[in-house]
Image: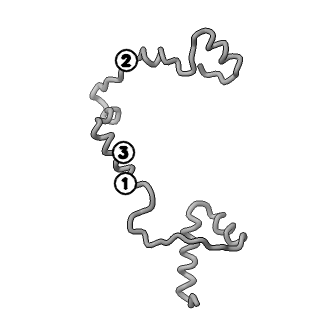
């Protein structure tokens, strides 16, 4: 069923159709790899588990980061200027502050 109109959905349900049409899904034969195209080869259970574990290891903050989380207030126009550059604005702001420190005393 592909319609989202309530009346059509009700009529389909009265005819015995469902949103997922589970009978049609159950009736399909399982996929069998013909061995010709390596890109179509299904993953083994071990390959799938290794992929899941690799994904879990890479989630979150990078290990060994020397950055510290803090709360700081900036003028709206300054933030707007950095954010206008798109993703990576915090990294660019950090680089600008680092460059400023090369020629100025932080105190």
Label 3: few (<14), some (14–19) or many (≥20) C-alpha neighbours in 10 Å? few
Q: Which residue is mark 2?
A: 29
Residue 75 picture location, percent across and down: 71, 73
Q: Residues within 10 Å of mark 1 (few under 14, many from 20)?
A: few
Name which residue lies at 55% across and 74% down: 94
Q: Which mark is residue 57?
A: 1
Image height check: is 20 above or below 57? above
Q: Nearer the viewer, residue 88 or 44?
A: 44
Q: Residue 52 lies in what quarter of the image?
A: top left
Task: Give the alpha-carbon distance from disc 1 to disc 3, as whole Å.
Answer: 9 Å
The reply to whether residue 96 is visible in this rendering is yes
In this rendering, does residue 104 appear at all?
no
Q: Residue at x 47, y 14 (%)?
A: 23
Disc 1/disc 2 C-alpha distance (Å)? 36 Å
Quadrant the N terminus occupies: top right
Q: Residue 70 at what x, y percent from top left?
A: 56, 71
Rendering coords of residue 97 (x, y %): 57, 79
Mark 1 vs mark 2, foreground winner is: 1
Secondary structure under tag 1 reads helix
Q: Secondary structure at mark 3?
A: helix
Residue at 45% x, 61% y is 61
Label 2 crowd (10 A; few <14 / some 14-19 / many >=20): few
Left or right side of 56 for 67 = right
According to the picture, the residue beneath numbered tag 3 turns out to be 52
Quarter holding the C terminus? bottom right
Which numbered disc, 3 or 2, marks the residue closer to the eye?
A: 3
Q: Nearer the viewer, residue 42 or 64?
A: 64
Q: Quick one: 17 or 71, which is closer to the camera?
A: 71
Determine which of the numbered discs, if any, sits on residue 22 in the image. none
């Amino acid at each position: 069923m592909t319609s989202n109109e309530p009346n059509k959905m009700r009529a389909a349900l009265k005819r015995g159709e469902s949103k997922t049409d589970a009978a049609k899904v159950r009736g399909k034969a399982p996929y069998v790899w013909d061995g010709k195209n390596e890109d179509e080869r299904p993953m083994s259970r071990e390959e799938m588990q290794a992929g899941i574990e690799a994904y879990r290891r890479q989630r979150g903050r990078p290990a060994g980061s020397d950055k510290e989380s803090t709360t700081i207030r900036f003028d709206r126009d300054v933030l707007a200027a950095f954010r206008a550059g798109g993703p990576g604005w915090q990294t660019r702001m950090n680089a600008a502050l680092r460059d400023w420190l090369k020629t100025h005393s932080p105190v």
